[in-house]
Amino acid sequence: MKFEDIEIEDVDFGAMLEESFKKADTKSDLVDGVIVKIVEEDNQAIIDVGRKNEAFMSLDQIRDEDGEIFFKEGDTIPVVITGQRGERPIVSYELAEKRAALAEFIEEYDDEQEYVIEGTITKKNKGGFVVDVSGLEFFMPRTLSYISYKTDPIGKNIKALIVKVDKEKGSVIVSRKELIEREKAETQEIVDKLLENKAVVVGTVKKITSYGMFVDVGGMDGLVHYSQISHKGPVNPSKYYKEGDEVNVVAIDYDKKKRHLSLSIKEANLDPWKDIDNTLRAGDTVSVTVSNIEPYGAFVDLGEDLEAFLHVSELSWEKNVKHPKDHIEIGQKLDVQIIEIDKQQRRLRVSRKTLLPKPIDQFASANKVGDIIKGTVSSVTDFGAFLKIGAVEGLLHNQEISWEKGKTAKDICKTGDELEVKIIKIDREQGKVSLSIKAMQESPVAAFAKKHKNGDIVEGTVKDKKDFGIFVSIEPGVDALLRLDDLAPLKEEEIEKGQTIRAVISFIDAKNDRIRISVRRLQRQEEREALEKLNAEQDDSMTLGDAFADFKRK
C-alpha cells in the first residue's frame, strides 16, 4: 500500500508539527545567540539574540551527564525563541539542536529508500502525534496511527513507516497503519501457505510458558499448546525443549480476529498409535526410561513418542510399597513387560515385577510345610497378624494362635515382634503362606486322647446348644459333641447351659480335635454292666445240689 492510497484528512501536517513544538509566536525562528552571562545560582543563561532585549535560557539544556556546563560566556550557539518572560524572550538550545538534526535528516533523505522507524510517542494534538526517534521529532497523523481515541498513547513505543518528507516545511510524516497493514498482509500470506497443505516447517522456540511455547515460523510467532507437543498427551514443554531449539511444526489454525496462529509438533510427527499393533504386543519386554514419578506410580518413556504407566502395584512383589521413589528414580532405565495395550484410549500399562523372580517361588524352594521358622510381625489385624519372612509375608490367623479359645494375635504380639511359627500351608498360585503357633504345641484333645479311650465315662458342663447337638466342656480346651440322637433318655428342652452331663466317649479323633460323647450309650453300657453284675451275683449263690439237679435234667 502506498502513501498516496491512504485516505488522510485534508490538514497541514507541517502546521500540526509546528503546533506540537509549542511555538509561542509565529515570528519565532532559528537564530544564533551569544552567551552573555551564566548565572548558576538562578540556573539560567542570558543570551544575546540580536534583538532589543536579551533572552533567558535554562542551564539544564547545556549541561552534560555529570552536570557540567559545556559552553562558556561568549560562545555562540543556535537557539529557537519559544516564548516570553515579561519583556524578555525565552530561547531553547535543545529545540534548535532537534531542528538542526531534523533538517539534516531531511536533507539526506532518499526518496528511493524505505525507512522503518522505532520511536516513542511524546505529544499529541487534535490532528495526531509527535514521535520521538533518537531525538528527531516526526509527525504521525491520527488517521495513520491505528491508535484508538480512547487510549492515552503518550510514552508508547511504536514502529512506523516514513511515508512523506516535506523539505520546504521541514516535516516528516510517518504511518503506523501502513506498517501494520503490510505486516497483516505478510502474516496472512504466511498463514495461507502454512494452512494450505499442512506442510511440515522448521521453527525456532522463542519462549516457553506453563501452557505451551511460542515458535517462530518464517518471522511469525505461533503457539504450540502443551497438548500439541507430544502424542503422549499434555506434557510440560520445559522438560522437552529450551529456547533456541529448532522444532518441526504444522499449522493447525489461525484466529484472524486475535491474530493467533496455532501450531502442532505432534502433528508434524508420525502417530505411533496408528501402527502400534505391528510394533508392540502384550507380553513383550521393552526397555524404558522413567520420565515422571507420582505417589500412585510412574510414567515411563518407550521412545517413538510413546509413554506407558507403571502402577505402584506393578513395581515389586512387595505388597506394601509406600512410594515408587523408594524403588526407582527419574531418568533410570528399566526393563518392563507390557501388560495392556488400549488402542482406543491410547493407554499403555507395563509391569516391572513380572520380570522379577516371585518371592513365593523362592520361599517355596527354600521352605516346606511343617518347617518351623522365625518371622517379624509387620502388622496386626482383627483376624490375625502378618509376619515378614524374607521377601514374603505369611498370615498367622487368630485360629492358629493358641489352643486356648478366644485368644487373638493382639493378645500375644505387636508390630516389630519376632515370633517362631510353623508353616502349615504354601499356596504358590495365590502367593500366600499360612503360619501357626498352636501347630507347634500338643493339642488338649491329643493330650486327652492319651489318657482316655472309647467307652470311658466322662462328666462335663454344657457349653453351647446347636440345632444338631450340644457342646460339652470336659476339660480346659477339650470340648465334646453330644448329638441330639445320643441325648436320650435326657430331653433337649430340659438341657441348659452350665448343666452337668455324664456320658460315655463314643469317638476320639485326636488329629482333627474331635470328640463325641453319648448319654444313650452310657445308659446301655450301665444297664449291661448292671446285668453282668447281677448274673455274677446269681452264679455265686447257686448250691451243689442245684447244680447236680440241673445236670440230671440235662
Image: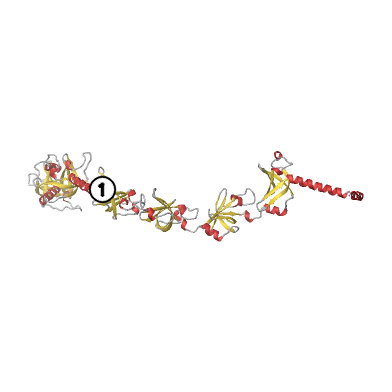
Residue 154: where, in percent of width, then height? 21, 43
The total of numbered circles placed on residues is 1
Q: Is residue 343 left or right of residue 62?
A: right
Q: Could you tell me residue 52's position as x and y percent?
A: 7, 44
500 vs 303, left or right, is right
Direction front: furthest residue = 554
Q: Is residue 182 left or right of residue 535?
A: left
Mark 1: give few (<14), some (14-19) or many (20+) Cα within 10 Å. some
Percent from the top left, x then y, of residue 422? Answer: 60, 56
> Where's the N terminus, which quadrant?
top left
The way the protein has been coloured in the rendering is secondary structure
Q: Secondary structure at mark 1?
A: helix
Q: Is residue 23 above or below residue 417?
A: above
Residue found at the far bottom of this picture: 366
Residue 158 is at least partly visible in this image: no
How far from the left and from the top, in percent, is residue 39? 15, 49
In the picture as drawn, the residue positioned furthest to the right comes out as 545
The structure residue drawn at horizontal position 71% and vertical position 55%, both measured from the top left corner, is 450
* Nearer to the camera, 150 or 526: 526
Considering only vertical position in the picture, is 429 above or below 181?
A: below
Q: Amino acid at mark 1?
A: Leu
Which residue corresponds to mark 1?
195
Would residue 122 be visible to someone looking at this image?
A: yes
Q: Nearer the viewer, residue 11 or 65?
A: 11
